[in-house]
């Protein structure tokens, strides 16, 4: 329920509404308006490779080695972005903050980016779309990406003073997501209304389970 509601303070309850799709409480790191369907990937790791793995110390013996390492990282990052472009990916939904080099490359390729999504957001997106997160540094970064979701729309949404992302997918399961925009004059009122609605939905869920049995 937490991923399917968004509370907005400073507005009357009458401004509350239900929107199709999901509202992600993050702003775009890069945004390109596009009509029609968008091919999207879920990302749970940096697309710019690190010099070394966790717990491994990276040592260089000269300025030349350091510069060569930087060129390798830049080349690898560019290869990943080219791989995404060759698969016509136009939207990255990332649970981690991406390096500025990735954002710049995404802008150059016309790819929209939403980063710092919660693990719950990624899990819900994966459940709705049926895709797993993209692995950028696997054995083959030149082949077809099979885990691609198709977004029917993706656009900015302003909730009060907060910039969010409003996105919709064709669901692969029976669940068709909608998001409740719950407005109230103060946070406490919103919380009361939210708890009441969650309780009502829980009761209805139990009622339907009883009927099905």
Image: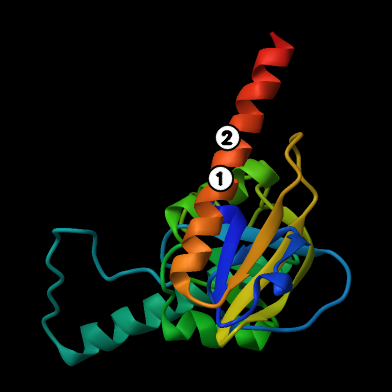
In the displayed structure image, the side of residue 198 where residue 153 appears, left or right: right
Instruction: Identify the residue at image location x=22%, y=83%.
Output: 65
Question: Where in the figure is residue 98, as x and y percent of width and height?
Answer: 44, 75
The disc at residue 17 is: none
Q: Check disc 2 and report its element: helix, strand or loop.
A: helix
In the displayed structure image, the side of residue 45 where residue 35 appears, left or right: right
Give above or below for 100 relative to 57: below
Q: Disc 1, disc 2: CB below 8 Å?
A: yes
Give above or below for 181 relative to 103: above
Instruction: Identify the residue at image location x=63%, y=45%.
Output: 131
Which class describes the residues within 10 Å of circle 2: few (<14), some (14-19), or many (20+)? few
Q: Nearer the viewer, residue 194 or 50?
A: 194
Q: Check disc 1 and report its element: helix, strand or loop.
A: helix
Question: Where in the figure is residue 150, as x and y percent of width and height?
Answer: 77, 56
Give above or below for 150 relative to 94: above
Instruction: Identify the residue at image location x=60%, y=31%.
Output: 203
In the displayed structure image, the side of residue 50 where residue 87 appears, left or right: right
Question: Where in the figure is residue 16, as x and y percent of width and height?
Answer: 70, 68
Q: Which residue has dot 1 on it?
A: 198
Place residue 112 in its image quadrant.
bottom right
Which quadrant is home to the C terminus?
top right
Q: How far apart, in angstroms, are the residues tagged by discs 1 and 2?
A: 6 Å
Residue 134 in view here: no
Q: Which residue has dot 2 on it?
A: 202
């Amino acid at each position: 329920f937490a991923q399917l509601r968004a509370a907005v303070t400073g507005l009357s309850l009458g401004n509350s509404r239900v929107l199709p799709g999901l509202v992600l409480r993050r702003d775009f790191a890069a945004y390109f308006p596009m009509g029609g369907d968008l091919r999207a990937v879920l990302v749970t790791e940096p697309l710019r490779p690190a010099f070394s793995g966790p717990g491994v110390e990276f040592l260089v013996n000269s300025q030349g080695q350091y510069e060569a390492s930087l060129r390798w990282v830049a080349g690898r990052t560019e290869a990943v972005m080219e791989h995404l472009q060759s698969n016509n990916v136009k939207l990255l939904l990332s649970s981690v903050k991406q390096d500025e080099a990735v954002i710049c490359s995404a802008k150059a390729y016309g790819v929209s980016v939403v980063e710092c999504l919660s693990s719950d957001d990624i899990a819900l997106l994966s459940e709705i779309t049926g895709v797993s997160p993209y692995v950028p540094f696997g054995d083959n970064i030149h082949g077809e990406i099979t885990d691609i979701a198709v977004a029917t729309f993706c656009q900015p949404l302003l909730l009060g003073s907060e910039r969010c992302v409003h996105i919709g997918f064709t669901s692969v399961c029976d669940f068709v997501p909608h998001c409740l925009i719950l407005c109230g004059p103060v946070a406490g009122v919103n919380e009361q209304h939210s708890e009441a609605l969650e309780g009502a939905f829980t009761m209805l869920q139990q009622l339907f389970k009883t009927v099905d049995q």
